Image (cartoon, rainbow, N blue to C red):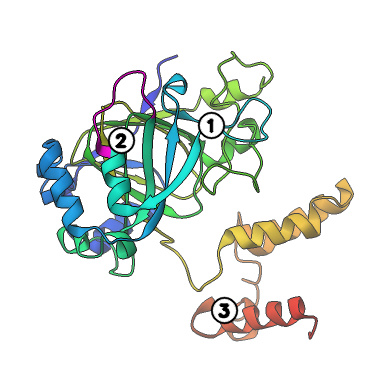
Amino acid sequence: MMAATVPEIDATSIGSADDFHRHIVEQCQPIVLKGLVRNWKLTHIANDRAALADYLQSHAANHQIGVFTAPAAINGQYFYNEDLTGFNFRQETMRFPDALRHVMVDRKADEDTAYLGSVPCNDYLPTLINDLPMPMLASRVTPRLWIGHAAHIATHYDTMDNLACVVLGRRRFTLYPPDAIANMYVGPIDFTMAGQPVSLAAESVSAFAPYPYFERARDRVLVADLEPGDALYLPKLWWHQVVSTAPLNGLINYWWDAFALGPDTPNLSLMLAMINIAERPHAERMAWRAFFDNYVFRPERHPLEHLPPERRGILGPLQPDNFGRIRARIMQALRGTA
């Protein structure tokens, strides 16, 4: 089966942060932004290993950090062990400058591979941020560095929107839509490799057994091949596998919630609903599903559109007042004081 490709646009066609939000983010669909960061200094020097090493070291803070290290036999495919009791890699702690040297060293085919992921630039490369302009995003949205040998990062989702910018090597993103979750055979959500649960089926070397329904997800796959300077906008909850094949690969990404109204996240609501609803009888779950559809997902209309706006109470516009009122009621209930 030939996978469909993620749509692409020339990044220079994005005129402003408002354009980016309105025409790209609000569509909640992945899209490749060709050449978005081709003018970054980091992108320009990345192919010169010595220059890149000097450049990153000049910005590096001397903090401790964890580095993923894996035997050559796994071919960079970081994953669980066979019985899901552990992982096929190990994590080592070292000083960040030493970690950079560790991942940037040339390696032979039979030597261990290493990977540094999700490094907050604010903490570990604070002065580098000045060389990573991203006017499409608010200044509070800060970059993270991913750098290492060839790697195969297991199919997972994030609960934040993601702008992934390739600066070195090439990356292939293989995507599945959020509503494919029932066919993804999700691994443990509280015992993960790097924070987010992964699809066991997407990483299985067997055909579809013991994951027969995964074929339904495979029929909807999208692929994006990114070169240095390209970026992928990936909405939250899209499943993505990331494969980088060059001897050394580098990426800068930004995570943010493009539609946040406050400090709480939809994932917190999901977790709370799981403990309150998931194991009730089927008929009651379906009853609550109808209420969630009516008040939360609103597939057809606002649940109180038949009332004058001034009589909708806390179900009126969330901003500027109702968000705080609803949140206060929830917090009182959780504390047992409501």
Residue 62 makes an appearance in the image: yes
Q: Residue at point 44% right, 64% down?
A: 259
Name the residue located 67 percent from the left edge and 19 percent from the top edge.
Answer: 212
From this viewpoint, is residue 43 visible? no
Q: Nearer the viewer, mark 3 or mark 1?
A: 1
Q: Please say if 209 is above or below 333.
A: above
Between 183 and 52, the one lying in front of the other is: 52
Q: Which residue is mark 2?
A: 7
Q: Looking at the image, which is closer to me, 269 or 209? A: 209
Q: Which mark is residue 323?
A: 3
In magenta, the rendered stretch is 104-112
The quarter in which the N terminus is drawn is: top left
Q: Residue 14 in the image: x percent, y percent?
A: 19, 53
Q: Is residue 107 magenta?
A: yes
Residue designated by label 1: 79
- Mark 3 and mark 2 in contact? Answer it, CB < 8 Å: no
Residue in the image at 64% along x and 45% along y: 191
